[in-house]
Amino acid sequence: MAERIIFLRLIGRLNRPRALAATLAVVAAAALAIGCGSRDEPDLVNGKALFIGEGTCGGCHTLSRAGTMGNQGPNLDESFGPSRRQGLGEKTIQGVVHEQIEQVRRGSIMPEDLVTGDDARDVAAYVAEVAGQPGEDTGALATAGLAEATDGEQIFTAAGCGSCHTLAAAGSTGTIGPSLDELASVAEDGGPTPEKYVEESIVEPDAVVAEGFQEGVMPANYQDQLTPEQIQALTEYLLESSGG
């Protein structure tokens, strides 16, 4: 009973313009449909990759564990975190998100068919897994979407750079490594060209270590994880975002 009350409040916040009875019916159907796809279990890695990449969800929604700071749509941590703490179950959250993806509200800026079928289920499952949850993604989830990322911001997010570095343009506030907000000015004096300085900092992070920080903290395998095109895109993004 308590979970149902929380659920009704959540639906009211996310979907005020709809008739509640119609929304409940659609959500119930979506919850049943989630288990009827071609795979037995959702693929959380695919869900995160789509959320931050091809599905472009992160461009409009804040979801801390995915490293996204979009503000055109609801903040998913704020939307689901309080309800989760009051007892709303993960499967219920998954059903709500799945319904929002498949039944886009009339007049919403959210495009229809961003993701469909198993992909929609995977995105819903990932959001339900992490929304409002503290901490960071680990294992395969930590770099989900990296292989498919093409623009600098996507690469920055998927590679987990924001967990260690502050960069205002990306909404990241990490303090394990140096702030990147002044990177462009530092790079001017750091190497043959700013681009070379930043590229070397990515692929050989211990070659030059900023004062006050330690060697061996930043992963040294980005040259293996990123393609040359991704390194170039990330370099350009960092310089542009820091005033270069």
Image (cartoon, grey):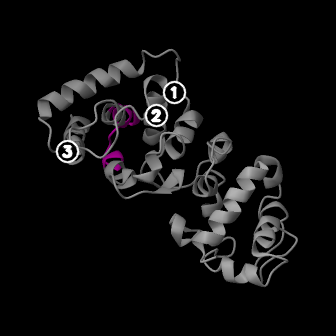
**Left or right for 109, reference 203:** left
> Marks 1/2: CA distance?
6 Å
**Within-10-Å neighbours for mark 2: few <14, some 14–19, many 20+:** many
Residue 164 seen in this snapshot: no
Q: Position of residue 194 (x, y in %)?
A: 76, 75
- Are the two marked residues, 1 and 2, in contact with CB atoms closer than 8 angstroms? yes
The residue pinned by badge 3 equals 9
Tell me the SS state at disc 3.
Answer: helix
**Which of the numbered marks, if any, corresponds to residue 97?**
none
Mark nearer the N terminus (3 vs 2): 3
Disc 2, SS: helix
Write down the region rendered in magenta. 83-95
Residue located beneath label 1 in the image: 42
Q: Nearer the viewer, mark 3 or mark 2?
A: 2
Q: Which picture quadrant has residue 238?
A: bottom right
Q: In the image shown, does 143 or 113 lie closer to the viewer?
A: 113
22 left or right, relative to 143: left
